[in-house]
Amino acid sequence: MNKFCTGAITLVLLSWGLSAIADSQPFDFDVDLSIYEEGDIPTTLLGEKIVIKTDTQDSGEKVNYVTGQSSSRTGKIQVNSIHLSNPFEVIIEVLLADYSDAEIVLVSEENGELTKLTVSGYSITLGSNDRVYSSDISSWKRDKVNSIKLKFDGNLVKFYVNGDFVQSSSLDNPNLTATRLEIDKLNNEHHIFAIKGRNLGTGGSSSSPTVNTPQVNVSPEVEATIREAAMQVCRSNPASCGITVDSSCTTQKASYNPNAGELYIPAVNVPDAFGGITTYEVYLTQQPSSFTFNLDLNRVTPR
């Protein structure tokens, strides 16, 4: 049986919260809007009829976003020189106008359009799928910023809202590489706060086969206990970011990536029903645009 040192893990919570992207797989591109001032035209996006505006969060922090210059749907964002090979994902954090569609398109130099997502605050259409109404998506936040993710996984592209799966669509050619991202038909009611993407695997390389790690099923009771234990030690000792140990132990520290926004906790002790202790390695993820964060059940590993 593994021996673990007694002590406390303390989570360092930055003022703007946490979000869920693995430290081991950083973003291949992440558009930095913070370098601009309000009123700037973001030339790095190679866009048309777009402008930088500033929004004041509930915390008082000012955050930049990119939007169309007018009520006409003539704004366009274009992110060139990306290189995303299946499997990969693209994440866009956006506040959408209710009845004004924008189009998110991933393009391959080899074969043109890979997929298109038509989105508004009212409805969403992935490729040739039937329209999905936002009122039917439980995780959709009306009149608030939502995190939209397109995940290319084998012969499917999967669509998520705020971490929850919504639907998928088949890909005609899953082996193509995305080289350009376009967000078209923007007006001044579309507010885009983040645009980023990352490769998730080897892109089909035969020299580095994918290793499938079995998922660990965690009961709601264990999940609640882990979350409460992590929050409690954070409240008790916010100055520390590691584990309190004696001289015979090795310090294990929680790690946080401010760009990706994921908090990794190497060890949390959880009492079981038989009076024992099980130690878990866990990740916490943020709900977009809030200070609430959840346990990532797909990455809870007994140690």
Image: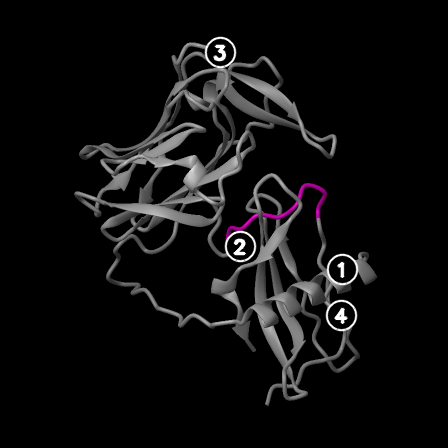
Residue 19 position within the rendered picture, expressed as x and y whole percent measured from the top left: 57, 48
The quarter of the image holding the N terminus is: bottom right
Residue marked by disc 4 = 8
Which mark, residue 180? none
Work out whether residue 146 or residue 7 is closer to the camera in this orientation and state it. 146
- Which residue is labeled 2 in the image? 23
Quadrant housing residue 267: bottom right
Number of the front mark, 2 or 4: 4
Secondary structure type for disc 3: loop
Please rate how many residues cluster around mark 4, counting C-alpha atoms within 10 Å: few if below 14, some from 14 to 19, many from 20. Answer: many
Q: Secondary structure at mark 1?
A: helix
N-term-proximal mark, 4 vs 3:
4
Q: Name the residue tied to disc 3.
A: 69
Q: Which badge, 1 or 4, is on the more N-terminal residue?
A: 4
Q: Which label number is shown at residue 234?
A: 1
Residue interval drawn in magenta: 14-22
Q: Residue at x 53, y 37 (%)?
A: 141
